[in-house]
Image: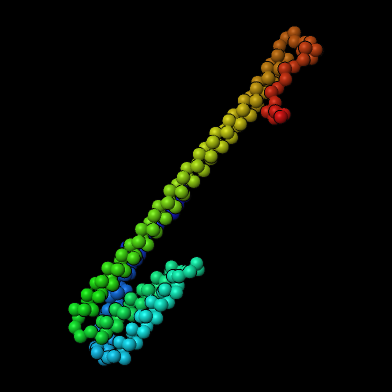
Amino acid sequence: MNDQIIARHWLAIIAPKAAPALATSTVLILARIWNANGAEHSIGNAVLMTALSLGAAAAGVCASIGRAGDSVIAGTAFAASGGLALAGVAGYADGLSLPLLLWVLATAIAYGLAARYWRTDRRESVAYERQTSARREEHAHIERVEALRAGAQIEVARTGAAYAEQLAQALVTRAALPGFDFKAVEAAGLPELPSTNKEI
């Protein structure tokens, strides 16, 4: 009901969707710069990148097995392993065709994995919105019922007060009439006012 309306900037909307392409493009660009600075056909550099990639993959396997496995750490380790493998091949290769092919493949895989998380996130946010909307409707209904109950109690109190006022006015008017005998009214008894606090 009183939610703030927040308009997100278009960059904030596009940035998560562009992140996989930006990551793989950055790795490709840095690997080609490394290639131009002496990594081409360097066995030592290829062995280093292979060892780092295998190490990151092993860390991902260790993080994903067992009961205490963490999917975030495992995913990060596997992504690092893939990035290191892409950088190693792009830095070692002669031409640009193989690095570009690997870049397209890595970008497609990154978007495939990210789409799964985006769907899950979207499903959770839609479920949260539905639950929040249902709670709001329930609370609004309770508020309406309580407002009606309070209004009814106020009207009952007003009716009782109006009755007492009319009775007092009638008694004053009757007392002013000629020939009114107050002692006869006292002997007959006055009508009892309705009680608003009923005993249970």
Relative vertical location of residue 124 with respect to residue 87 in this rendering, above or below = above
- Residue sticking out furthest to the front: 66
Residue located at (42% from left, 73% from top): 61
Q: Is residue 85 visible?
A: yes
Marker count (numbered): 0
Look at the picture and state if 186 lies above or below 137: above
Instruction: Identify the image quadrant of residue 108.
Output: bottom left
Taking the view exactly as shown, the residue that stands out farthest to the top is 179
- Residue at (24% x, 72% y) in the render: 104
Q: Where is residue 156 in the image (x, y as percent from the top left)?
A: 62, 28
Is 131 located above or below residue 64 in the figure?
above
Q: In which quarter of the image is the C terminus?
A: top right
Residue 31 seen by the camera: no
Q: Compared with residue 95, is residue 101 higher up or lower down, i.e. above or below?
A: above
Task: Return the x and y of residue 22 as percentages of the image width and height.
Answer: 30, 72
Q: Residue at x 38, y 56 (%)?
A: 122
162 or 153: nearer the viewer = 153
Which quarter of the figure has residue 117? bottom left
The spot of residue 174 in percent (x, y) is 70, 14
In depth, the one of 178 and 187 nearer the eye is 187
Taking depth in this image into account, of 189 and 196 the one nearest to the observer is 196
Image colouring: rainbow
Q: Residue at x 61, y 31 (%)?
A: 153
User: 29 left or right of 146?
Assistant: left
Hey, which quadrant is residue 41 in on the image? bottom left
Place of residue 85 in the rendered image (x, y in percent of width and height, measured from the top left): 31, 79
